[in-house]
Image (cartoon, rainbow, N blue to C red):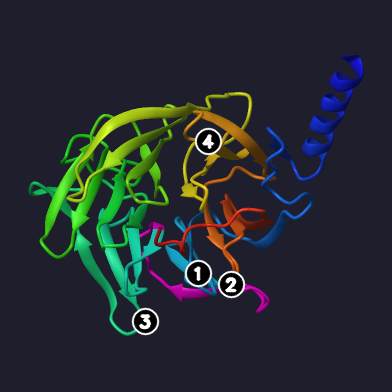
């Protein structure tokens, strides 16, 4: 018994030393010693999204969206001003969608046409400051709307919301108005479950998502409250196995939504704000963290691109 216990402790220590990852049940996800700095020198990085060959990300206070091409030097400006864009994703045609703090809108940006507003209000009331956005394979746009970018402007909707928007019909559905600070969100591999992180309460939630964008069955996946470490629940992603990756105190957490527990962690040098799958086979995880962007190799694979 003592021999087995010592081996277990030694294995745990080795996992923590090798790249800051903590694996359980022998299912290691992060490749040891593979975390590396991809870009630095920004004010507050957010919104990573992979377009198939490049990483898009925001510097929110810098009011600029950048594009990073691996192996081609420093990131380049994609467009500026950006209305203090935060989260990004891509629609079914590969066009960039943006959650904008400054405008309080979801917009689409293309190189040819520039910026176009997609949705700006709910029941005639201006949105707060959309934070993150994803797109279902049928085109349904899902986004969170906390008050972080309001500044001196009063909230017209009066709550922090999670919404679904059908661009074809113009119909907007309120999924939840009870989360304190809804932030990152992601869809399960079969797109039947929506995951949303609540920054204020350090929790990850799940909803059963219907075809029309309505949701039911709200349930807590995991609570990762830990005031001893820097970082909050923010960006959320999912891999092909259905595991949920999200920023958390100390870095990145990976949760098994069936078991309702964190199964692995990755420590980051700076407070992580968001994350996105990237690389040729979507096995690399890009992480925005304050002034920096990091990349880590994994033994998992992301779903599609950042549109999922």
- Marker disc for residue 121: none
Q: Which residue is mark 1?
A: 66
* Residue 8 vertical placement versus 208 (above, below): above
Q: Position of residue 75 (x, y in %)?
A: 58, 72
Residue drawn 55% across and 55% down? 43
- SS of the residue under disc 1: strand
Circle 4 crowding by C-alpha within 10 Å: few under 14, some 14–19, many from 20: some
- SS of the residue under disc 4: strand
Mark closer to the chain start, 2 or 4: 2
Nearest the viewer among 70 and 278 is 278
Mark closer to the chain start, 2 or 1: 1
Circle 2 crowding by C-alpha within 10 Å: few under 14, some 14–19, many from 20: some
Q: Which residue is mark 2?
A: 75
The stretch of residues the image draws in magenta is 70-87
Residue drawn 38% across and 40% down? 196
**Could you give the CA–CA distance between mark 2 and mark 3, rounded to whole angstroms?**
17 Å
On the rendered structure, is 44 left or right of 189?
right
């Amino acid at each position: 018994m003592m021999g087995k216990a010592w081996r277990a402790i030694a294995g745990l220590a080795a996992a923590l030393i090798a790249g800051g990852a903590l694996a359980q049940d022998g299912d290691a996800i992060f490749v040891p010693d593979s975390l590396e700095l991809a870009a630095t020198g920004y004010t507050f990085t957010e919104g990573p999204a992979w377009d198939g060959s490049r990483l898009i990300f925001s510097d929110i206070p810098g009011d600029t969206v950048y594009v990073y091409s691996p192996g081609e030097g420093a990131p380049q400006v994609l467009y500026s001003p950006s209305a203090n864009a935060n989260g990004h994703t891509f629609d079914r045609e590969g066009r960039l969608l943006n959650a904008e703090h400054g405008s309080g809108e979801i917009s689409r940006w293309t190189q040819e046409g520039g910026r176009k507003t997609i949705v700006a209000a709910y029941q005639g009331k201006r949105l707060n400051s959309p934070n993150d956005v994803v797109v279902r394979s049928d085109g349904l746009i899902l986004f969170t709307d906390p008050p972080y970018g309001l500044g001196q402007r009063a909230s017209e909707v009066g709550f922090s919301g999670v919404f679904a928007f059908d661009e074809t019909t113009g119909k907007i559905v309120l999924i939840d108005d009870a989360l304190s600070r809804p932030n990152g969100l992601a869809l399960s591999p079969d797109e039947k479950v929506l995951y949303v992180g609540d920054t204020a309460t350090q929790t990850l939630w799940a909803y059963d998502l219907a075809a029309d964008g309505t949701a039911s069955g709200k349930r807590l996946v995991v609570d990762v409250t830990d005031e001893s470490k820097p970082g909050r629940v923010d960006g959320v992603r999912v891999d092909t196995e259905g595991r949920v990756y999200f920023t958390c105190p100390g870095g990145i957490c990976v949760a098994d939504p069936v078991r309702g527990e964190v199964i692995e962690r990755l420590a980051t040098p700076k407070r992580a704000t968001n994350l996105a799958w990237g690389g040729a086979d979507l096995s690399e995880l890009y992480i925005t963290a304050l002034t920096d962007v990091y990349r880590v190799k994994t033994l998992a694979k992301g779903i599609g691109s950042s549109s999922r």
